[in-house]
Image (tube, rainbow, N blue to C red):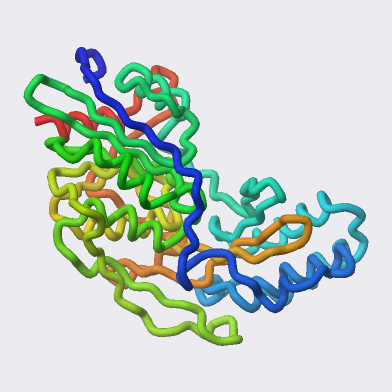
Amino acid sequence: MRNKTLKYALLVVSGGIALLASSISGCFPDPYSVGEPDSLFSEYVLVWELVNNHYACFFANENVDWDQSYQTFKPEAENLQNRDQLKDICLELMSSMMDQNLILRDSAGTRLDSWNEGDFLNWDLTVWMDYMQEWFQVFHMDLEAYGATVINIISTEKVGYVYLSDLGSGFDMIEFYSATSVVADCSGIILDLRMCGESGSEINAHYASGRFIDKNALSYYRAFREGPGRNDMGEKLEVYSYKNGAWQFTEPIILLTGRFTRGAGEQLVLLLRSQEHVTVIGDTTAGFANPAVSYNLTEGWSIEIPSMVTYSLDGTLLFNSGIAPDILIEVSEDDFAAGVDPVLDAALEMVVR
C-alpha cells in the first residue's frame, strides 16, 4: 500500500484553545485548594485529602488501604526539603491507586503520571512521521492536538485521515469541525485514536463524536461519586451519542485504538462504536475511561482526580479493563524497526475499496 503513488490535498490544524467544560470535567475551586498550605507537609496532606474526598474509583480498588498509604509516607513527608521531594512522594502515594488518570501537573502543565502499566504501544512517533511525510505533506508533526487530511488513492476515490491526540485543553470544537470539513466528500476515513492519551474531558468526546454520528444511540453508562464516603457512588446514568455540527460523516470509518487510548479517548470509542458504519481495529484500549477534574495546588501545580466512572453497555467497568477492538492487529518492535505501521496499513486496506 505504501508504494502507491498518491496525490494529496491537506488541512492540518492544531488546537490551542481550552474549552471550559460543564460539571462533567474541568478545573473547579475546592475547599481544600483554597489558600496556601503552610508547609510542604501540609501540601502532602492536601493531596491525600483531595483524593480521599473526590476520587471515584475506591470501590474498584478494594485492596488499597488509603489510610495506610497516608501513614506509610507520613514520616518522610514531615521532613520534606523541597518541591522535588514533595512531587516524588505525592506520586508514590498516588501510585497505590494504579490509575493512569490520577496525575500531577507541574507549573508548566507537564503531565506527571503516578502510575503506568508500561504496555507496548501500537504506534511509533518516528514511523508515524515517516508515513505522514510520505503521504500527506504534514505541517504539524508534534501531535499537539488533531489533524485532518484527504488523500486521493485513485482518481475516482478520496480517503480521509483524522488523528486526535488530545481531548483535553488542546481541543477546540470549532477548530476540530473546521479541520474535519476537508473529509466531507471522502468515500471513507481512518480515525486514529492510538495517540489520544490525555485523560481529557467527556464533553470534548461528545463534541468530537458528533461529526461522525449517523444515528443517536445509547453508548455507555457513567456514575459519579456523590457523597463524602469513599464508595458513595450515584446510580448508573445512560449516555447517548448525538449528532453535532452542520453535517455528519456517515461513510465507512476505520477507528484505530491501542493501549495508549485512555480517558475521554475511550469514551469517544464507546460513542462511535455504537454506529454501524464504524469498525474498530488495533489493540485494546487502556481501561481508564474516567476523565478527571483538576484541582489547584500551590505554585501553579495541580492534581487531576477521576470523579466519575464509565461502564460499557454490557456493564463492564472500564477500570483496568479496556475496550477490545473488532479486529486485533498484531504489532511488534520489529515492525517499527522496519519502518512499518501494521495498524495503518490494515486500515488503508480496509478503507480503499
Q: Residue at x 54, y 44 (%)?
A: 118
Q: Is residue 301 left or right of residue 6?
A: right
Q: Is residue 126 left or right of residue 7?
A: right
Residue 102, above or below 29: above
Q: Residue at x 29, y 31 (%)?
A: 149
Residue 267, above or below 165: below
Query: For residue 72, which quarter of the picture?
Result: bottom right
Residue 24 on image: x %, y %: 45, 70
Q: Residue at x 34, y 27 (%)?
A: 341
Q: Is residue 41 left or right of residue 199?
A: right
Query: For residue 351, which quarter of the picture?
Result: top left
Residue 174 on image: x %, y %: 36, 50
Query: For residue 44, which quarter of the picture?
Result: bottom right
Residue 191 on image: x %, y %: 29, 41
Q: Is residue 224 left or right of residue 210?
A: right
Residue 254, above or below 52: above
Q: Residue at x 38, y 45 (%)?
A: 175
Which of the two residues, 198 or 160, is positioned nearer the viewer here? 160
Give the quadrant of the N terminus. Answer: top left
